[in-house]
């Protein structure tokens, strides 16, 4: 593709309100996009606090022999136990970082979890 042609097209685009232009000739193609054509990143706000897995392992709602029923809509206090992640060598406790209401429970008993995976979402 001729650089003179690219320059002419670029100059021409500046005089229009086009955000995107595609030109094809003899199996050569050029696509030009202005900054206005670029998608804007999604903007959203979330008031929920994520509780993530502290390690790679298996999630358990409570130690063996104990019962810790958790349900969406349940009130929790900061520091309340939300279960544990069991690894080969250790059991890592999961506690509520804030007081509030459990809105989403994505953790499943006995299922594997990855480090940093969101297990719960709490609405403060």
Image: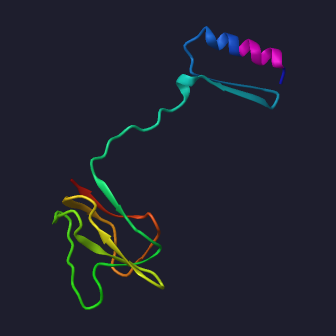
Verify whether residue 4 appears in magenta: yes
Using the image as rendered, state which of residue 112 and residue 79 is in the foreground: 79
Residue farthest to the bottom, as pictured: 65
x then y, percent, for residue 87: 45, 81
Dividing the picture into quadrants, the one containing residue 91 is bottom left
Verify whether residue 13 appears in magenta: no
Dividing the picture into quadrants, the one containing residue 28 is top right
**Which residue is rendered at x = 57% and y = 17% of the image?**
18
x then y, percent, for residue 72: 20, 65
Q: Is 79 drawn above or below residue 43 in the view shown?
A: below
x then y, percent, for residue 4: 82, 14
**Which residue is rendered at x = 28% and y = 61% of the image?**
97
**Which residue is rendered at x = 42% and y = 38% of the image?**
42
x then y, percent, for residue 85: 39, 77
Using the image as rendered, state which of residue 40 and residue 93 is in the foreground: 93
Decide if residue 103 is on the left or right side of residue 12: left
Decide if residue 38 is on the left or right side of residue 80: right
Stretch in magenta: 3-9
Dividing the picture into quadrants, the one containing residue 96 is bottom left
Magenta stretch, main secondary structure, is helix
**Which residue is rendered at x = 32% and y = 42% of the image?**
45
Residue farthest to the top, as pictured: 15
């Amino acid at each position: 593709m001729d650089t003179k042609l690219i320059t002419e097209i670029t100059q021409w685009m500046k005089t229009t309100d086009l955000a995107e232009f595609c030109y094809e000739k003899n199996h050569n193609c050029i696509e030009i996009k202005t900054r206005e054509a670029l998608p804007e990143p999604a903007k959203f706000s979330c008031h929920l606090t994520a509780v993530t897995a502290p390690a790679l392992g298996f999630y358990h709602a409570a130690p063996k022999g104990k019962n810790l029923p958790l349900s969406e809509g349940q009130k929790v206090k900061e520091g309340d136990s939300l279960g544990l992640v069991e690894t080969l060598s250790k059991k890592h406790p999961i506690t509520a970082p804030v007081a509030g209401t459990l809105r989403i429970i994505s953790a499943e008993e006995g299922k594997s979890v990855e480090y940093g995976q969101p297990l719960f979402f709490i609405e403060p």
